[in-house]
């Protein structure tokens, strides 16, 4: 079983990677770059998969994070890729992901180094 802290770090890493692709760009520029689009989608799936594996106890540290929506978004990207809304993905990547990264960073600070042994029961 993998500790929640590592899943949280996965989210931060994926969020940082998304910011690299959207920072300083407009929506049209991202949409014109198939490699960047694919990278953003991949990192969004990483965020969703990691969020799905975090224990309810750790999730409760910030009830303002829309955990279920994050997981559901991942499922749409994976299973309904043909119906993706790029304007929604743009807002998610450029606005929601940086906010999520800040929230996750606060959870990591709250957990400190005491959390490494805590594992998600779903693993």
Image (cartoon, rainbow, N blue to C red):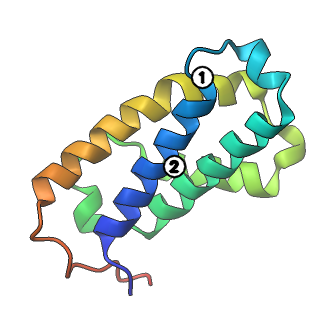
Q: Position of residue 115 (x, y in %)?
A: 16, 71
In this view, the residue farthest toward the right is 82
Task: Identify the residue at horizontal 29%, vertical 39% (top origin).
Answer: 103
Q: Which residue is mark 1?
A: 91
- Where is the N terminus found, in terms of image quarters? bottom left
Q: As drawn, is 11 to the left or to the right of 49?
A: left
Q: Is residue 20 above or below residue 10?
A: above
Q: Residues within 10 Å of mark 1 (few under 14, many from 20)?
A: few
Dot 2 or dot 1, earlier in sequence: 2
Mark 2 falls on what kind of element?
helix
Of the numbered discs in the image, which one, if any, rests on residue 47?
A: none
Q: Residue furthest bottom?
A: 1
Residue plotted at (47% across, 40% down): 16
Residue contact at pointers 2 and 1, CB within 8 angstroms:
no
Q: Residue 3: tell me if it is visible.
A: yes
Q: Which residue is mark 2?
A: 14
- Residue 100 vs 46, above or below: the answer is above
Residue 106, position in %: x, y? Answer: 20, 43
Q: Is residue 28 left or right of residue 23?
A: right
Residue at the spot 44% in from the left edge and 70% down from the top edge: 53
Q: Is residue 63 visible?
A: no
Observer-side mark, 2 or 1, equals 2
Q: In the picture provided, is 95 more to the left or to the right than 39?
A: left
Q: Quadrant of residue 31?
A: top right
Of residue 10 and residue 71, the one placed in the foreground of this image is: 10
Q: Residues within 10 Å of mark 2 (few under 14, many from 20)?
A: many
Residue 68: x and y in percent read 48, 52
Q: Nearer the viewer, residue 12 or 75?
A: 12
Element marked by disc 1? helix
Query: Which image quarter holds the C terminus?
Result: bottom left
Q: CA distance from mark 2 to mark 1?
A: 16 Å
Residue at point 12%, 67% (across, down): 113
């Amino acid at each position: 079983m993998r500790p929640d802290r590592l899943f949280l770090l996965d989210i931060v890493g994926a969020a940082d990677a998304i910011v690299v692709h959207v920072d300083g760009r407009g929506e049209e520029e991202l949409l014109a770059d198939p490699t960047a689009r694919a990278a953003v989608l991949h990192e969004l799936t990483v965020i969703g998969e990691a969020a799905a594996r975090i224990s309810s106890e750790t999730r409760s540290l910030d009830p303002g994070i829309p955990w279920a929506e994050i997981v559901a978004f991942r499922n749409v990207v994976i299973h309904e890729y043909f119906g993706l809304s790029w304007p929604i993905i743009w807002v998610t990547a450029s606005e929601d992901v940086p906010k999520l990264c800040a929230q996750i960073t606060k959870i990591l600070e709250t957990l400190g180094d005491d959390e490494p042994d805590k594992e998600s029961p779903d693993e």
